[in-house]
Amino acid sequence: METLLQSTSLVKRAYWLVRLRWIAIALLAAATFVAGKLFHVSLPAFALYFIAGLLVLYNFLLFDLLNYFTWGGRTASHITINRIITFQISADLFILTTILHYSGGIENPFFVYFVFHMIIASILLSSRSSYIQATLAAFLFGLMILLEYLGIISHHNLVGFVADTLYRDGLFVLGTFLILSTALYLVVYMTTSISEQLRKQQTGYERANTLLREKDHLKNEYVLRLTHDIRGHLAAIQGCLDIVGDQIVGPLNEKQTDLVQRAYRRTAKCMAFVTALLKLTRMKLSGKLEMEYFSLKNTIFNTIASAENRAASKSISLKYDIEPSVDEIYGEPVLIEEAIANLLFNAVRYTPEKGSIKLTAKDKGDSVLIQVSDTGIGIPQSEISKIFDEFYRADNARKVERDGTGLGLSIAKQVVERHGGKIWAENNQTAGSTFSFVLPKLSRKSGTA
Ligand code: ADP
């Protein structure tokens, strides 16, 4: 079907139409009041207020109908929503014609409001349906002015606003009809052309997006295979260096020992990098998390224990404040521990000697807020939005710590977001920075990412 919007946005547009109608109803009531009371234009006010009342009921009914089709996450089919919209627009044309009939017919300039209906139809419906709506509008308007002209139905004069003989002026009636009808078709033509272009663009973007996602998936599979292989080779090299370094295969002189140790350190760094990349790629590729109930408090204590030695070696004070109610949550404990550890290890790494680090965990009802604050080097303001990107390392961090993977925060971000949480970083007022993340207590019970 030649429609601009997909089902979900179509539902939103259907609600939008209902909202627009509330405005139209208010306008109708206000215009009737203002014209009658302030400008003393003679109007069948009762009939118009009655129509406004009926419109309120009708709009509530439509609202309920939409709720019925979308209730509890139900997704109504594209065709159903399309039918509801088509019905609404056609009904609105009938209603506008009725209102016009009771408020001066062709003498009421509000007939230009047919144009708005055509714009709405062209945005929401296919171009064929929009032309049908334009024909219906022209037909309804034409029929009303013809019947009034012929005296078959009564004409309600807008006494005090326009001369009350216009509706019987054949040339005026025909001219107005032709001008409005051509305007309606022109508006539909222009709006559907724009909508059509937008639709093509949107389809193009969607296709490009799918292609990108496929390419990304391929890239991840490639990286996974590669890192897995490299890791195997590195482990073998490390094993050999271990044996040589331990002088199991023969004694080494000082120079040889130094070279073997350097080779070992380099291999270990490479290993850390490859392992981090492997972890991140695995996480991106695997669709499911191994979720379970576990004690977040205990997980935090474990990470603090694993960071204590590192902190002590730099005389950094490591404090924590965990609210007693922070305990059981639903998630993947190993990954969450990894995310917290990455933040804590970074804090130690980027905080000079004798600094301090504080971890806090606060109960926020449905979620937990975890913050790691340090008195370290902080993050250059211009780079704060990039540090969660893969391989990104800020300039000041490179200066104090040559070896870094630029992957720790990406892993933490993946973990938090896959649990339905949010992670961010800020610089402190005085010194250092604070890394925070919010974790829902019952993140995605299904465990799917
Ligand atoms: P790595 O630490 O290996 O460089 P990460 O992904 O863990 O990689 O961190 C990315 C970058 O974020 C770091 O290079 C650094 O610029 C910045 N960063 C992370 N933690 C801190 C911190 N506690 N203080 C200052 N900068 C930090």
Image: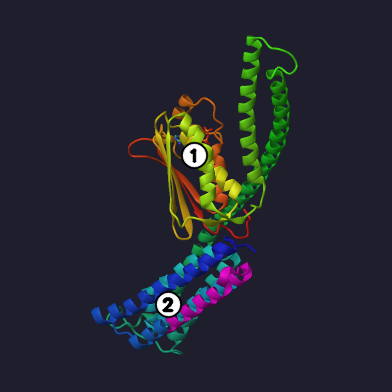
Residue visible at 55% across and 34% down? 391
Residue labelled with disc 2: 173
Give the quadrant of residue 331: bottom right
Amino acid identity at mark 1: Leu
Image coords of residue 60 (percent x, y): 47, 79
Looking at the picture, the colour scheme in use is rainbow
Residue visible at 63% across and 36% down? 277
Residue 339 lies left or right of residue 150; in this view the side is: right
Looking at the picture, tell me which residue is in the foreground, 373 or 31.
373
Residue labelled with disc 1: 344
Does the stretch in magenta take in 57?
yes
What is the secondary structure assignment of the residue under circle 2? helix
**Circle 2 or circle 1, nearest the eye:** 1
Give the quadrant of residue 33: bottom left
Q: Looking at the image, is 196 positioned above or below residue 185?
A: above
- Magenta stretch: give its range: 54-81
Q: Mark 2 or mark 1: name the one nearer the start of the chain.
A: 2
Image coords of residue 403 (percent x, y): 54, 26
Amino acid identity at mark 2: Val
Q: Looking at the image, is 394 positioned above or below residue 107?
A: above
Q: Overall secondary structure of the magenta stretch?
A: helix
